Image (spheres, rainbow, N blue to C red):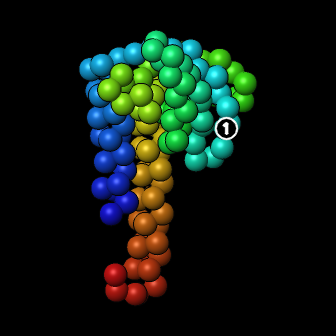
Amino acid sequence: MVTLICVLLPLASWRDDVAIEKRMGEAVAQVDSVAFNRTVVRYATPDGRVIIPPQGVLYPEGLNVGDNVRVQYDRGNPELVRVAGRTAVLSLLPVGTFLVSVWVVIAAVVTVLRRFGTQV
């Protein structure tokens, strides 16, 4: 199940990138808050609407509150926004590292259990 989730996560990121690239809008956003689970930005569209995506911005690594950052968004769904120049490729290293770590731990546990004669 963990492997499936780790495969689906980069695929979902890639799908979001494709949606943004199909109808791309660009803006300068201000970072309003940074938390573990999301980074909230605020930006204005050319028609004057101010957008604050409730799910935050994609690929927020290294952003700090008060920063101004260039973003790219889906004009059809302006709440789908990413930091300009960043793509789903950035998700591969952390997801891959996590997945390898999980399987190393599982392999170690199975090896120890077999060594002590427990059937796995």
Q: Residue at x 66, y 43 (%)?
A: 35
The one of 66 and 90 positioned closer to us in this rendering: 66
Q: Is the residue 61 above or below the residue 25 in the image?
A: below
Residue 43 lies in what quarter of the image? top right
Q: Residue at x 34, y 81 (%)?
A: 120
The one of 109 and 99 positioned closer to us in this rendering: 99
Q: Amino acid at mark 1?
A: Val
Q: Is residue 30 left or right of residue 13?
A: right
Asked if residue 108 can be seen in this view, the reply is: yes
Q: Residue furthest bottom?
A: 118
Q: Residue at x 40, y 87 (%)?
A: 118
The one of 104 and 50 positioned closer to us in this rendering: 50
Q: What percent of the width, then of the height, locates residue 71?
A: 50, 19
Q: Residue at x 59, y 30 (%)?
A: 41
The one of 33 and 111 positioned closer to us in this rendering: 33
The residue to which callout 1 is attached is 34
Q: Quadrant of the N terminus?
A: bottom left
Q: What percent of the width, then of the height, locates residue 90?
A: 45, 30
